[in-house]
Image: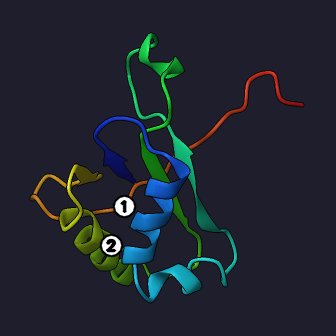
Amino acid sequence: MVTFAGSLSGVHAQQFFQLCGHHRSRLWSRTNDGFTQVNLSDNPLNNYLPEDSMLFLIGTFPKQEFIQGMYAAATTTPDATYSPIANHGNPATAQAGTAFPGND
């Protein structure tokens, strides 16, 4: 996940994605790869604010290659933060679940 200061417009998301270099075409060519924009917040009041993060789904993309590329893009982009960071301070990936309340 890459989180930005403030809200994330579609144009801003596209600009960041262009920085991802060779990853961008490969992120769409494998099973279950892609990204979505989300609001990363533990505060229920903030859950209604505009999206501020890009949640990447790496599917069958090689994990270490993905981590290295995304971390490099995030750390060279102003106001961007990569997560998760493992206990030893290195970038990592995580598993997540999702739900779409009210969506049949």
Q: Is residue 24 left or right of residue 82?
A: right
Q: Which mark is residue 93?
A: 1
Q: Quadrant of residue 57?
A: bottom right
Identify residue for label 2: 67
Q: Are marks 1 and 2 in contact (CB under 8 Å)?
A: yes
Q: Residue at x 27, y 63 (%)?
A: 74
Closest to the observer, 12 or 93? 12
Q: How is the image coloured?
A: rainbow
Residue farthest to the left?
Answer: 88
Closest to the observer, 95 or 12? 12
Give the amino acid type for the residue marked by disc 2 in the picture. Ile
Q: Where is residue 38 drawn, in percent x and y?
A: 52, 40
Q: Quadrant of residue 52?
A: top left
Q: Quadrant of residue 32?
A: bottom right
Give the amino acid type for the residue marked by disc 1 in the picture. Thr
The image shows residue 52, relative to residue 82, as above or below, that is above
* Mark 2 secondary-structure assignment: helix
Q: How many marks?
A: 2
Q: Where is residue 83 drawn, in percent x and y?
A: 29, 52
Residue 63 visible in the picture: yes
